Amino acid sequence: MKAAEAGIEDKVDRLLACLDQDVQQIQESLLQLNEIRRLVIKRDEAALGKLLESIQAGMNGYSEHELKRKSIRKELAESLGCSFEQMTLSALEVNLPQATKDRVTQMKAKLRSLSAELKKEYFSTALLLSECARFNNMLLRGIFDLGKAESVHYGSNGATKRQIEMAFVNLQI
């Protein structure tokens, strides 16, 4: 029984090391999201392009890391006699001695808080990019609609009347 417990402890240690890398990846993603917002606001297209290329290049390493985490999770599930889908950190906590259980609980709390922060930062970045796209569309529509104003005016009888006398850009040469 001691050998089985030692094997599980070793797998838990490997899983926690893997989850430490996940924590680092999430923290790096948070920094990258902040940098994306900063570069969009500064309108630094060259630096933004380089940042996006580096993010894309890092995705391959993350895929390999995710496979490693799934492999360790599968080994733990087999060792504890449960299915892969049931093997979560909460389920793992139940089957561990107190010292190891505390380490898993701390990791779970750290991952939960970082995930919540990442979700918030992702939403903020998506909102900024959405507003930029909306503003650019409005600007382009104003330029290329050849003076067709989007404003509607009402006459004294309540009838609507579009104001098309004003052009955004004078197209005369």
Image: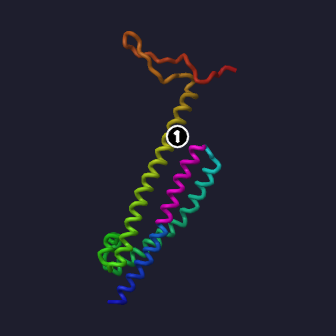
Which amino acid, by three-letter code, is at mark 1?
Cys
Quadrant of the rendered image containing residue 84: bottom left
Residue 15 is left or right of residue 168, and the answer is: left
Residue 96 is left or right of residue 162, and the answer is: left
- Please check the rendered image and state whether residue 26 is part of the magenta-colored stretch, yes or no: yes
Q: Position of residue 86 (x, y in %)?
A: 32, 70
Up-down relation of residue 109 to residue 13 (above or below): above
Quadrant of the rendered image containing residue 115: bottom left
Up-down relation of residue 87 to residue 147 (above or below): below
Up-down relation of residue 74 to residue 151 (above or below): below
Residue at 63% across, 21% down: 170
Residue at 51% across, 22% down: 149
Quadrant of the rendered image containing residue 144: top right
What type of secondary structure mainly makes up the magenta span? helix
Q: Nearer the viewer, residue 70 or 33?
A: 33
| Image quadrant occupied by the N terminus | bottom left
- The stretch in magenta equals 23-42
Q: Residue furthest top?
A: 156
Up-down relation of residue 102 to residue 38 (above or below): below
The residue singled out by tag 1 in the image is: 132
